[in-house]
Image (cartoon, rainbow, N blue to C red):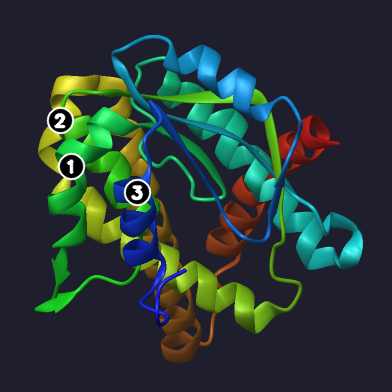
C-alpha cells in the first residue's frame, strides 16, 4: 500500500520494484481469473523471447444489460480476431491490463521509460497497458495472446461511463500507435495494415457521417447509400461476432 493514491502506473512500478519472481502477473481489481490462468500464461512465457502474454477477456456482468452483452461481444472480437491474428507474428499491440503476465527482467529494463512517459508536457496518467506493450516490442521482445487463459472483468453498464472509458482508450491508442509506428514495417506487413486500418476506420466513419449530414442539410436529399453502406458493413461484422461469441 502506498501512502496516497498516486495512480495505477505508480502503484504498478512500486509493486514491480518490490517483486522478486521471474514473472509478474497484472490483474485489475475488478477482474476474476480462472484457476488455470497462471499455469497457462507461464507455459507461454517459457520462451525467453516472450516479454508479455495476455489472456482472453470476458464481461463478468454480461447479463446486466444490452450494453454489457454488446461489450462482451466486442471483447470477443478484440481478443479472438485482432489479438489472435497479431499473436501469429508475436506482436500483440496491447496486452490488456485486466490479465497480463510480464517477464520481470524485461520490466526492469523498461521501468524508467515507463515511469517517465509524458504527454503534452505532463506525466501520463492513462494507457498504461498499451504503452508498456509498445515498450516491450521496441526492446525486441515478443508479445503473445493465450485464448484459453480466461479472465472475467466488470464492464460499464451505462452508456456515459462506457463512452468516457472509450474516449480514454482512444487517446491511448492514437498516441501510442504514433509512437510505435516505425516498429510496424519491421514486424510484418499484415500488422502495418491491421494497425493503420484500426486507426483510420473510425476517422473515415466520422467523415462519412459528417458528409452525409452536410448533404442532408445543404441539398435536402437523404444520403441513402452512405447510410446503407455503413449499416451493411456494421451488420455483417457484428453478425459474425454475435454467432461466434454466442
Q: Residue at x 87, y 68 (%)?
A: 65
Displayed quadrant of residue 51: top left
Which residue is labeled 2 in the image? 139
The quadrant in which the C terminus is found is top right
Image location (x, y in percent) of residue 87: 43, 21
Element marked by disc 2: loop
Q: Residue at x 35, y 42 (%)?
A: 197
Q: Residues within 10 Å of mark 2 (few under 14, many from 20)?
A: few
Q: Report the Cα–Cα distance between label 1 and label 2.
A: 8 Å
Depth check, front residue: 152 or 199: 152
Q: Is residue 212 left or right of residue 63?
A: left
* In this view, the mark in front (1 or 2): 1
Element marked by disc 1: helix
Q: Residues within 10 Å of mark 1 (few under 14, many from 20)?
A: some
Which residue is labeled 3 in the image? 18
Residue 63 seen from this side? yes
Image location (x, y in percent) of residue 188: 24, 19
Q: Which label belongs to residue 110? A: 1
* In this view, the mark in front (2 or 3): 3
Compared with residue 52, is residue 60 higher up or lower down, i.e. above or below? below
Q: Report the Cα–Cα distance between label 1 and label 3.
A: 15 Å
Q: Which label belongs to residue 228? A: none
Count of all numbered marks drawn on residues in the image: 3
* In this view, the mark in front (1 or 3): 3
Q: Residue at x 17, y 23 (%)?
A: 140
Depth check, front residue: 5 or 181: 5
Element marked by disc 3: helix
Residue 196 seen from this side? no
Amino acid at each position: 500500500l502506498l501512502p496516497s493514491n498516486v495512480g495505477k502506473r505508480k502503484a504498478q512500478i512500486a509493486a514491480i520494484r518490490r517483486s522478486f519472481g521471474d514473472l509478474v502477473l497484472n490483474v485489475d481489481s475488478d477482474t476474476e481469473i480462472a484457476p488455470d490462468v497462471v499455469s497457462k500464461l507461464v507455459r507461454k512465457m517459457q520462451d525467453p523471447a516472450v516479454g508479455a502474454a495476455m489472456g482472453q477477456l470476458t464481461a463478468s456482468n454480461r447479463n446486466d444489460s444490452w450494453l454489457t452483452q454488446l461489450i462482451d461481444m466486442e471483447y470477443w472480437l478484440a481478443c479472438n480476431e485482432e489479438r489472435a491474428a497479431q499473436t501469429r507474428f508475436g506482436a500483440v499491440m496491447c496486452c490488456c491490463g485486466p490479465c497480463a503476465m510480464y517477464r520481470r527482467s524485461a520490466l526492469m529494463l523498461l521501468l524508467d521509460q515507463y515511469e517517465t512517459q509524458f504527454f503534452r508536457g505532463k506525466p501520463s496518467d492513462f494507457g498504461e497497458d498499451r504503452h508498456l506493450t509498445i515498450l516491450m516490442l521496441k526492446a525486441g521482445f515478443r508479445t503473445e495472446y493465450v485464448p484459453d487463459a480466461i479472465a472475467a472483468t466488470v464492464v460499464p453498464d451505462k452508456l456515459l461511463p462506457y463512452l468516457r472509458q472509450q474516449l480514454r482508450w482512444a487517446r491511448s491508442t492514437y498516441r501510442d500507435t504514433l509512437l510505435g509506428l516505425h516498429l510496424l514495417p519491421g514486424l510484418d506487413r499484415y500488422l502495418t495494415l491491421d494497425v493503420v486500418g484500426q486507426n483510420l476506420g473510425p476517422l473515415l466513419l466520422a467523415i462519412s457521417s459528417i458528409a452525409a449530414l452536410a448533404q442532408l442539410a445543404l441539398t435536402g436529399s437523404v444520403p441513402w447509400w452512405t447510410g446503407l453502406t455503413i449499416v451493411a458493413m456494421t451488420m455483417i461484422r457484428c453478425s459474425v461476432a454475435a454467432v461466434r461469441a454466442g
